[in-house]
Structure formats: C-alpha cells, structure tokens
C-alpha cells in the first residue's frame, strides 16, 4: 500500500515537471517572436554605413548642388515605352535603337562633325608624302569621329541628313580609319576613296561605295578608343581656349557648343559593349562625369553664360584628368 502511494507520488511529481500541451505551444510562440525580433535587430545593425570618403569616380559623377547647377523642370523618372537604355546594358542592337541620341546631340552638330572631318582628311591626303609623314594620323582621328557621327545618325531617333547612307558610310570610314594606323600606299588610296565618298554625300548625291561587312554591327568597331581620345583632346583644347576670356567665349561659342555635343557622344559611345573597360564601374563613372560636364557646357552656351562655361570646362578637365590617371588608350 505504501509502495503504491510512493509510486503515485513520484508519478505526480513527474507529471508536474512535464509541460502541458497548451503551455508548450505558448512557449514556442514566445520563442519564435523573440528569435524574430533578435534577427530583425541583427539585420538592422548589419546595414552598410555610408563611406567616410567617396571615391573620385563618385564625386566626379554627381554635382555638389544639383539645384544650383541644373535649370528647367525636373525630369520624369518613369521612361516612356521604347525610351532609355536597354534592360541589358551589354546588348548592342537594343542600345542602338533604344537610346535617344537626340537628347545629347543635334543632327546639325553631327553634320558639322562630318564636314570638319572631311576637311581634315582632305588636307592630309593632298600629297602622298605628307600622308606618309604623319598625315595618316590626322586621317585616322578624322575618320574615327566621322564614323562615330554616322553611327549615331544611323541610330538617330529623329530625322537626320544622310540617314539612308549612314550605316554604309559608318562601316567604310571605320575600316579606313583602322587601316590608317600606318602610312602606306594602300591606306593612302583607301583614305582618298573615303574622302571622295564624303565629297559625294556633302555635295548631295547618294553613296555608291558599299562596305563588305558580313557580320552584325558592333558599336566598338566604329572607332578605336585611342582615336576617339585624340578627338576628345581637340575638343577639350578648344573648350579651354573658349573659357579663357569672355571675348574668346563669344568668338567660339558656336564651335564650343558642337564640340560639347560631340564630347557627350564619345562619352556615351566608349561605354558600349566590347569597348575596353566598358564593364568597369569606375571607368563608366569617369565617362558619365565627362558627359555631364559636356551637357553643362552646352547649356551654358545656350544661355550665353561665360561664368558657367568656365565652371563646366573645369569639370570637363577634371573628369578627363581623372580618367587619364587610371586608364590609357
């Protein structure tokens, strides 16, 4: 009898030590809530803090005070169908058709660029001796910039002169520009033929020469980056001269506007797929800063604001110097 009572007492004590089903469920809920709160707190603590000092690519890309620099209404940040960049930044054809080139360059500036390139190349091929003595370098840069202008015209989102012949002219000049790395009889004869093609277009006739391209167009084949960099140096030199004094600015304002637009074109072009370093974020930051500075110059020219031109040219030079410090060619 005593043994049975002892066993009953032990069984009761054991039962009292075990959690009941309801208590167990409540305990699990409280443990889950506490764990979730701790996890949330840990997640909040682990949030990345802003850097103590931004790198030069970031500081060169953005304005110190956008409201003090930019004019006009704020842009709509929701793009309309078919506008803006392709979802895939490395896709050549979608970029060519989707990007609105008219937002950074006028068709008149593209035409002027081609005419200027024709004049430079024509002078360099006047004599074969001059061409071989170094004129081929001038032709290489001139054909590179003209090929870039024709490439933009071919993809332009508005009407533009020579649009029906632009793709063919682009390919012909791109190949000739590449071959003008050296001054030979072959590159000289090809350069003369391309100058004749430019004469044909500028005089109002259709292009008769045909490129032998079999593969799809790739933006990086328009011109080598080194040739485009030489063209940018010319644009920067004129910008510095125009900013030197108010009288120089007034005298060179029209040319400065065109140079600014072509600077923006090249800054956009060298970020396209297959160009060297196009996937490098810092490199793209330098190119974006250069394009932004070019847009500042163009806006300052339109408002005839010499002081704004001085600031914008300073930003352009800063972006170019920063890029040259990290990248070559």
Image: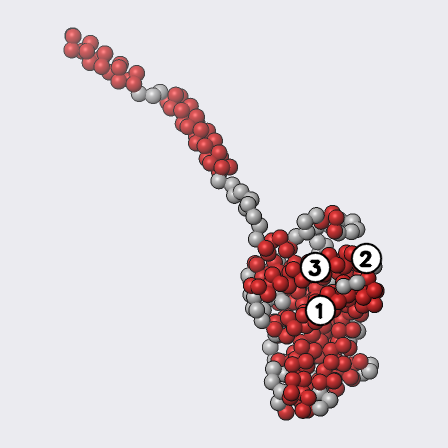
Q: Give the mark, 1 or 2, whose residue is nearer the N terminus.
A: 1
Name the residue at 40% across, 24% down. 27
Looking at the picture, tell me which residue is in the foreground, 278 or 8: 278
Question: What is the x, y in percent for residue 266?
Answer: 67, 67
Name the residue at 74% across, 69% down. 238
Question: What is the x, y in percent for residue 311?
Answer: 73, 56
What residue did someone put label 2 on? Answer: 305
How far apart are the two marked residues, 3 and 1, measured between alpha carbons? 12 Å
Q: Give the mark, 3 or 1, whose residue is nearer the N terminus.
A: 1
Q: Which mark is residue 237?
A: 1
Q: Which mark is residue 65?
A: none
How far apart are the two marked residues, 1 and 2, measured between alpha carbons? 19 Å
What residue did someone put label 3 on? Answer: 314
Question: What is the x, y in percent for residue 85?
Answer: 66, 59
SS class of the residue under badge 1?
A: helix
Q: Give the mark, 3 or 2, whose residue is nearer the N terminus.
A: 2
Vertical order, 287 against 141 (above or below): above
Looking at the picture, tell me which residue is in the foreground, 316 or 119: 316
| Labelled pair 3, 1 in contact (Cβ < 8 Å) | no
Q: Residues within 10 Å of mark 3 (few under 14, many from 20)?
A: some
How far apart are the two marked residues, 3 and 2, measured between alpha carbons? 14 Å
Vertical order, 248 against 136 (above or below): above
């Amino acid at each position: 009898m005593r043994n049975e009572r002892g066993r009953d007492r032990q069984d009761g004590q054991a039962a009292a030590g075990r959690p009941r089903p309801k208590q167990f469920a409540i305990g699990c809920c409280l443990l889950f809530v506490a764990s979730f709160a701790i996890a949330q707190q840990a997640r909040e603590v682990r949030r990345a803090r802003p850097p103590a000092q931004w790198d030069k690519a970031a500081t060169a890309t953005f304005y110190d005070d956008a409201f003090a620099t930019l004019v006009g209404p704020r842009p709509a940040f929701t793009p309309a169908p078919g506008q803006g960049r392709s979802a895939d930044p490395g896709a050549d054809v979608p970029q060519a058709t989707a990007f609105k080139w008219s937002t950074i360059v006028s068709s008149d500036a593209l035409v002027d660029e081609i005419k200027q390139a024709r004049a430079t190349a024509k002078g360099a091929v006047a004599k074969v001796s001059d061409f071989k003595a170094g004129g081929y370098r001038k032709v290489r840069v001139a054909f590179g910039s003209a090929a870039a202008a024709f490439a933009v015209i071919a993809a332009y989102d508005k009407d533009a002169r020579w649009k029906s012949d632009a793709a063919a002219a682009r390919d012909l000049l791109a190949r000739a520009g590449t071959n003008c790395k050296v001054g030979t009889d072959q590159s000289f004869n090809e350069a003369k033929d391309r100058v004749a093609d430019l004469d044909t277009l500028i005089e109002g006739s259709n292009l008769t020469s045909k490129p032998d391209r079999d593969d799809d167009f790739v933006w990086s084949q328009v011109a080598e980056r080194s040739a485009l960099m030489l063209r940018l140096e010319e644009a920067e030199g004129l910008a510095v001269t125009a900013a030197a004094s108010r009288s120089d600015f007034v005298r060179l304002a029209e040319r400065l506007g065109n140079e600014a637009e072509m600077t923006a074109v090249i800054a956009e072009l060298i970020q396209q797929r297959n160009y060297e370093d196009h996937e490098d974020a810092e490199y793209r930051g330098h190119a974006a800063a250069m394009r932004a500075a070019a847009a500042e110059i163009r806006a300052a020219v339109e408002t005839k604001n010499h002081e704004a031109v001085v600031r914008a040219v300073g930003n352009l030079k800063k972006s170019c110097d920063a890029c040259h410090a990290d990248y070559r060619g």
